Protein backbone atom coordinates (compact mmCIF):
# COMPACT_ATOMS: atom_id res chain seq x y z
CA UNK A 1 0.00 0.00 0.00
CA UNK A 2 2.91 2.33 0.75
CA UNK A 3 4.37 1.70 -2.71
CA UNK A 4 1.06 2.61 -4.40
CA UNK A 5 0.96 5.93 -2.51
CA UNK A 6 4.52 6.69 -3.63
CA UNK A 7 3.72 5.86 -7.25
CA UNK A 8 0.59 8.03 -7.15
CA UNK A 9 2.59 10.85 -5.54
CA UNK A 10 5.31 10.58 -8.20
CA UNK A 11 2.75 10.54 -11.02
CA UNK A 12 0.93 13.58 -9.61
CA UNK A 13 4.24 15.41 -9.28
CA UNK A 14 5.18 14.59 -12.88
CA UNK A 15 1.77 15.71 -14.18
CA UNK A 16 1.92 18.98 -12.30
CA UNK A 17 5.45 19.66 -13.59
CA UNK A 18 4.35 18.93 -17.14
CA UNK A 19 1.42 21.33 -16.68
CA UNK A 20 3.81 24.02 -15.45
CA UNK A 21 6.07 23.46 -18.44
CA UNK A 22 3.18 24.19 -20.82
CA UNK A 23 2.58 27.51 -19.01
CA UNK A 24 6.29 28.36 -19.30
CA UNK A 25 6.28 27.51 -23.02
CA UNK A 26 3.23 29.70 -23.59
CA UNK A 27 4.92 32.61 -21.80
CA UNK A 28 8.15 32.13 -23.76
CA UNK A 29 6.26 32.15 -27.06
CA UNK A 30 4.38 35.34 -26.24
CA UNK A 31 5.62 38.32 -28.27
CA UNK A 32 5.75 41.62 -26.46
CA UNK A 33 5.93 44.69 -28.70
CA UNK A 34 6.88 48.02 -27.19
CA UNK A 35 7.14 51.23 -29.14
CA UNK A 36 8.24 54.68 -28.19
CA UNK A 37 5.54 57.31 -28.36
CA UNK A 38 5.39 59.12 -31.69
CA UNK A 39 6.19 62.79 -31.16
CA UNK A 40 3.57 65.29 -32.21
CA UNK A 41 4.68 67.07 -35.37
CA UNK A 42 5.67 70.65 -34.68
CA UNK A 43 3.79 73.61 -36.11
CA UNK A 44 5.84 76.80 -36.19
CA UNK A 45 4.31 80.18 -35.49
CA UNK A 46 3.54 82.09 -38.70
CA UNK A 47 6.77 83.50 -40.19
CA UNK A 48 9.05 81.05 -38.36
CA UNK A 49 10.32 77.54 -39.19
CA UNK A 50 11.53 74.34 -37.60
CA UNK A 51 13.95 71.43 -37.82
CA UNK A 52 13.27 67.77 -36.97
CA UNK A 53 15.55 64.75 -37.17
CA UNK A 54 17.22 61.83 -35.47
CA UNK A 55 20.82 61.75 -34.24
CA UNK A 56 21.95 58.13 -34.58
CA UNK A 57 25.18 58.07 -32.59
CA UNK A 58 24.85 60.59 -29.75
CA UNK A 59 24.03 57.99 -27.08
CA UNK A 60 27.15 56.02 -28.12
CA UNK A 61 29.30 59.03 -27.30
CA UNK A 62 27.46 60.06 -24.11
CA UNK A 63 25.56 56.93 -22.96
CA UNK A 64 24.52 58.16 -19.51
CA UNK A 65 23.94 61.86 -20.15
CA UNK A 66 20.87 63.97 -20.85
CA UNK A 67 21.55 65.37 -24.31
CA UNK A 68 20.52 68.59 -26.01
CA UNK A 69 20.46 69.87 -29.58
CA UNK A 70 21.57 73.48 -29.82
CA UNK A 71 20.81 75.68 -32.86
CA UNK A 72 23.77 77.96 -33.60
CA UNK A 73 23.35 80.71 -36.18
CA UNK A 74 25.62 80.31 -39.20
CA UNK A 75 27.30 83.37 -40.69
CA UNK A 76 28.85 82.91 -44.12
CA UNK A 77 28.26 81.40 -47.53
CA UNK A 78 25.94 78.38 -47.37
CA UNK A 79 26.86 77.08 -50.84
CA UNK A 80 30.61 76.91 -50.18
CA UNK A 81 30.22 76.14 -46.49
CA UNK A 82 32.72 78.88 -45.66
CA UNK A 83 31.83 80.80 -42.58
CA UNK A 84 31.41 80.33 -38.86
CA UNK A 85 28.75 79.66 -36.30
CA UNK A 86 28.34 81.06 -32.84
CA UNK A 87 26.75 79.03 -30.08
CA UNK A 88 25.28 81.49 -27.62
CA UNK A 89 23.10 79.32 -25.40
CA UNK A 90 21.37 82.26 -23.73
CA UNK A 91 20.07 83.50 -27.10
CA UNK A 92 19.71 80.52 -29.40
CA UNK A 93 17.20 77.70 -29.10
CA UNK A 94 17.84 74.23 -27.78
CA UNK A 95 15.80 71.10 -27.26
CA UNK A 96 16.18 67.71 -25.62
CA UNK A 97 17.31 64.68 -27.56
CA UNK A 98 14.94 61.85 -26.63
CA UNK A 99 16.16 58.34 -25.73
CA UNK A 100 15.81 57.20 -29.36
CA UNK A 101 17.76 60.17 -30.72
CA UNK A 102 14.82 62.22 -32.04
CA UNK A 103 14.61 65.99 -31.71
CA UNK A 104 12.40 68.89 -32.80
CA UNK A 105 13.36 72.55 -32.86
CA UNK A 106 10.36 74.83 -33.33
CA UNK A 107 9.84 78.53 -33.99
CA UNK A 108 13.27 79.27 -35.49
CA UNK A 109 14.00 82.48 -37.37
CA UNK A 110 14.39 82.03 -41.12
CA UNK A 111 18.17 81.79 -41.54
CA UNK A 112 21.03 79.29 -41.65
CA UNK A 113 21.94 77.15 -38.63
CA UNK A 114 24.48 74.57 -37.55
CA UNK A 115 23.14 72.10 -34.99
CA UNK A 116 25.41 70.86 -32.24
CA UNK A 117 24.62 68.01 -29.85
CA UNK A 118 25.87 67.27 -26.36
CA UNK A 119 25.18 67.31 -22.65
CA UNK A 120 26.71 70.82 -22.35
CA UNK A 121 27.47 73.53 -24.93
CA UNK A 122 31.20 73.32 -24.18
CA UNK A 123 31.39 69.63 -25.15
CA UNK A 124 28.78 69.65 -27.93
CA UNK A 125 29.66 68.24 -31.36
CA UNK A 126 28.24 69.38 -34.71
CA UNK A 127 25.87 67.36 -36.85
CA UNK A 128 27.86 66.31 -39.90
CA UNK A 129 27.11 66.85 -43.60
CA UNK A 130 26.57 63.93 -46.01
CA UNK A 131 30.30 63.59 -46.68
CA UNK A 132 30.89 63.33 -42.92
CA UNK A 133 33.70 65.88 -43.16
CA UNK A 134 32.19 69.13 -41.91
CA UNK A 135 29.26 70.63 -40.04
CA UNK A 136 25.88 70.43 -41.78
CA UNK A 137 24.52 73.88 -42.62
CA UNK A 138 20.72 73.97 -42.50
CA UNK A 139 18.68 76.73 -44.13
CA UNK A 140 15.40 77.32 -42.31
CA UNK A 141 12.67 79.12 -44.26
CA UNK A 142 9.53 80.83 -43.05
CA UNK A 143 6.57 78.51 -42.41
CA UNK A 144 8.54 75.36 -43.29
CA UNK A 145 9.91 72.42 -41.33
CA UNK A 146 13.26 70.95 -42.41
CA UNK A 147 13.20 67.15 -42.07
CA UNK A 148 16.80 65.97 -41.67
CA UNK A 149 16.08 62.27 -41.26
CA UNK A 150 18.92 60.32 -39.62
CA UNK A 151 22.16 62.21 -39.05
CA UNK A 152 25.48 61.67 -37.27
CA UNK A 153 27.67 63.82 -35.08
CA UNK A 154 31.46 63.86 -35.10
CA UNK A 155 33.26 61.64 -32.62
Image: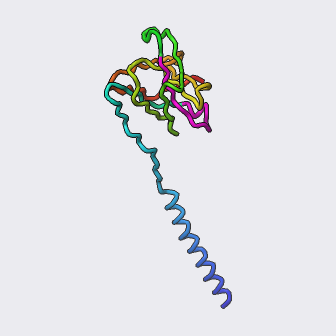
Quarter location, residue 110: top left
| Spot occupied by residue 107 in the image (x, y as percentages of width and height) | 39, 29
| Residue in the picture at 50% in, 16% down | 131
Quadrant housing the N terminus: bottom right
| Spot occupied by residue 2 in the image (x, y as percentages of width and height) | 68, 89
Give yes or no for residue 144 being in the magenta stretch.
Answer: no
| Residue in the picture at 40% in, 23% down | 109
Quarter location, residue 123: top right
| Spot occupied by residue 88 in the image (x, y as percentages of width and height) | 54, 22
Q: How many marks?
A: 0
Quarter location, residue 139: top left
| Spot occupied by residue 108 in the image (x, y as percentages of width and height) | 41, 26
Question: Which range is magenta?
Answer: 57-73
Nearer to me, 129 or 142: 142
Nearer to me, 4 or 142: 142
| Residue in the picture at 54% in, 28% down | 117
Amino acid sequence: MNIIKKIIYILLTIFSLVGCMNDVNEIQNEIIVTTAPTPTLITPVDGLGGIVGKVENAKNIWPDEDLFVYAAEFYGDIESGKGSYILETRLFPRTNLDTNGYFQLNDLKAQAYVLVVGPFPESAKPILNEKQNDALIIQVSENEIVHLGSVLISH
